[in-house]
Image (spheres, rainbow, N blue to C red):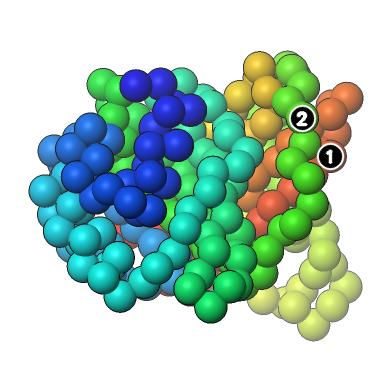
């Protein structure tokens, strides 16, 4: 299935049908959460079906996909989750695809909801998207926030983790990143218009990347 369908069906797997894991995942598929170690031991669709079944017995959460970044052999997307107590939180997933199935997954959930309307897609040059994403690291705006502050003495270098997800057709780009000597994990997703970042979503994990 294509990446847009993978995104939609992945949410359905968590919402209603754990058996969809067998249509979505490679046999060696691994997952990593920025908030918990629970997914670390889950490998492949059979273990995923068992995990999601147990999860849904305790958590009545509903996931809704939002902004897709389709990079062909990898994709990222913004999503919302509505919890049993009525809270809505926004998160981001990044995925590597092999033979039409998810082979690697990274997931982050934020502490609040982004209730703004999602931006419409607008085509952008691939090189511009890559430059904007990588410019966010190193000497880009993240590091600039700390110039001249007490934090300036700390190692706050921001480094891209793995490959950037670039979607020229939609004018969107996403990247996993690490920050500082402790390799704090994070993810950024950008919507671009006229060569500039028009919307940005940034989430940080509480644990380093496992792969």
Q: Nearer the viewer, residue 196 or 113?
A: 113
The secondary element bearing badge 2 is classed as loop
The quarter of the rendered structure image containing the N terminus is top left
Dot 1 or dot 2: first in sequence order is 2
What residue did someone put label 1 on? 198
Picture layout, residue 168 above or below residue 39? above
What residue did someone put label 2 on? 120
Q: Give the image location of residue 53, x and y in percent.
A: 21, 61
Residue 169 appearing in the image: yes
Q: Give the image location of residue 144, x and y in percent.
A: 82, 59
Q: Residue at x 52, y 39 (%)?
A: 76
Q: Nearer the viewer, residue 56 or 98?
A: 56
Q: Residue at x 61, y 66 (%)?
A: 88
Picture layout, residue 111 above or below residue 41? below
Task: Please indicate whether residue 208 sits to the left or right of residue 171 in the image.
Answer: left
Classify mark 1: residues with Cα within 10 Å, few (<14), some (14-19) or many (20+). few
Classify mark 2: residues with Cα within 10 Å, few (<14), some (14-19) or many (20+). few
Picture layout, residue 84 above or below residue 82? below
Q: Residue at x 80, y 82 (%)?
A: 150
Q: Nearer the viewer, residue 178 or 181?
A: 178
* Quadrant of residue 151 within the rendered picture: bottom right
The secondary element bearing badge 1 is classed as strand
The label on residue 15 is none
Question: For the view shown, which residue lies furthest in the bottom direction?
Answer: 150
Q: Give the image location of residue 93, x and y in percent.
A: 48, 48
Q: Give the image location of residue 191, x and y in percent.
A: 74, 36
Disc 1 or disc 2, which is closer to the eye?
A: 2
Task: Please indicate whether residue 209 sits to the left or right of residue 63 in the image.
Answer: left
């Amino acid at each position: 299935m294509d990446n847009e369908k993978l995104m939609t069906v992945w949410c359905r797997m968590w919402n209603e049908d754990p058996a969809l894991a067998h249509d979505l995942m490679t046999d060696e598929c691994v997952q990593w959460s920025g908030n918990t170690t629970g997914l670390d031991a889950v490998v492949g669709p059979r273990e995923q079906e068992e995990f999601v079944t147990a999860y849904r017995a305790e958590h009545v959460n509903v996931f809704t996909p939002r902004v897709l970044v389709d990079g062909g052999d990898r994709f990222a997307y913004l999503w919302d989750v509505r919890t049993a107590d009525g809270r809505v939180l926004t998160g981001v997933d990044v995925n590597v695809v092999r033979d039409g199935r998810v082979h690697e997954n990274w997931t982050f959930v934020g502490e609040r909801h982004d209730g703004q309307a999602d931006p419409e897609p607008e085509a952008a040059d691939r090189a511009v998207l890559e430059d904007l994403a990588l410019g966010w690291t190193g000497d880009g705006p993240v590091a600039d926030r700390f110039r001249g502050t007490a934090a300036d003495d700390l190692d706050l270098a921001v480094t891209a983790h793995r490959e950037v997800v670039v979607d020229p057709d939609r004018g969107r780009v996403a990247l996993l990143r690490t920050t500082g000597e402790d390799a704090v994990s994070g993810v950024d997703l950008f919507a671009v218009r006229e060569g500039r970042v028009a919307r940005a979503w940034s989430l940080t994990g509480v644990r380093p990347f496992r792969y």
